Image (cartoon, rainbow, N blue to C red):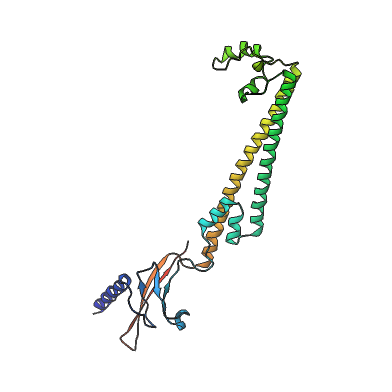
Amino acid sequence: MTRTFVASLLILALTLMIMPVSGNAGDNDYFFASQQPYEIAQAGEDEWGTSPSVGSFSMNPEGYKSPSRAILYSLLLPGLGEIYVGDSRTKATIFLAAEAGIWSSFVAFRLQGGWKKDDYKEFAVVNAGIDPEGKNDFFWDIIGFHASRQDYNKLSRVYTRTNPYYPDTPEWDWQWSSSEDQREYRDIKNDSKSSYRRANFALGAAAVNRLISMFYAWRSAKGHNRDLIDEFSKLRFEAHPDAYSNDIEFRLEYTHSF
């Protein structure tokens, strides 16, 4: 008899869980509404604090912070994800200040590299008679290691046949006035390259700053949500028989956490 009663309860519970709800629910009844995910009928004000109407059972309680949104915010601007989660203002300020410093450095190094580039080209025009029109980066590199066009055509192409041959025309001709001027040209050109490399390092630092901020924002959001919800991802069905009547009260509870 007891086994039959328990089996009947289980069948009734499964039926209530899968059947759509129609009509109005009573004050003491709980139904699983199949039209919306995790939707249940709400009881009267004494039990749930709401009017007796069907409402949504939200997986995300009030104050929930989306970890994916926190990651996105930190990707757009490091420190913004921490502000969204409500994490330490100091931590967000550090990320924002680092981002401002990184991009300021990037702009400064790019400008410095461009100024040095203009300097070494102008220096070569004055001290080696270079015609700067139509010259590529390879040309500006090799003139720092060869005193003249003739010297380049004789020596460089002996070791590397793929290097271009410069014809005996004024637009491709150069002749350094002294080895000291040629050395100074290389120094200015190296300074320009170093500035551009530092600008690239700044871009790498910006990427690292984002990755660190994304990690902390994600971890802070997860910790924040754990504090909001006590039980993780649990579905519970309860049946409460009334000792003074033949009625049975069924309740379906679902809790979810990230």
Give residue 38's position: percent from left, percent from top. Answer: 40, 68
Report how many numbered discs are placed on residues in the image. 0
Q: Quadrant of residue 12?
A: bottom left
Give residue 77's position: percent from left, percent from top. Answer: 60, 51
Q: Quadrant of residue 3?
A: bottom left
Q: Quadrant of the N terminus?
A: bottom left
Q: Nearer the viewer, residue 121 or 207?
A: 121
Residue reaching furthest to the bottom:
244
Q: Is residue 116 left or right of residue 257?
A: right
Q: Nearer the viewer, residue 85 or 34?
A: 34
Q: Is residue 180 left or right of residue 48?
A: right
Q: Nearer the viewer, residue 226 or 84?
A: 84
Q: Quadrant of residue 85?
A: bottom right
From this view, report whether residue 35 is shown above or below residue 45.
above
From this view, report whether residue 209 is shown above or below residue 114.
below
From this view, report whether residue 108 is shown above or below residue 3.
above
Give residue 109's position: percent from left, percent from top. Answer: 68, 38
Q: Residue at x 65, y 52 (%)?
A: 96
Give residue 179's position: percent from left, percent from top. Answer: 74, 16
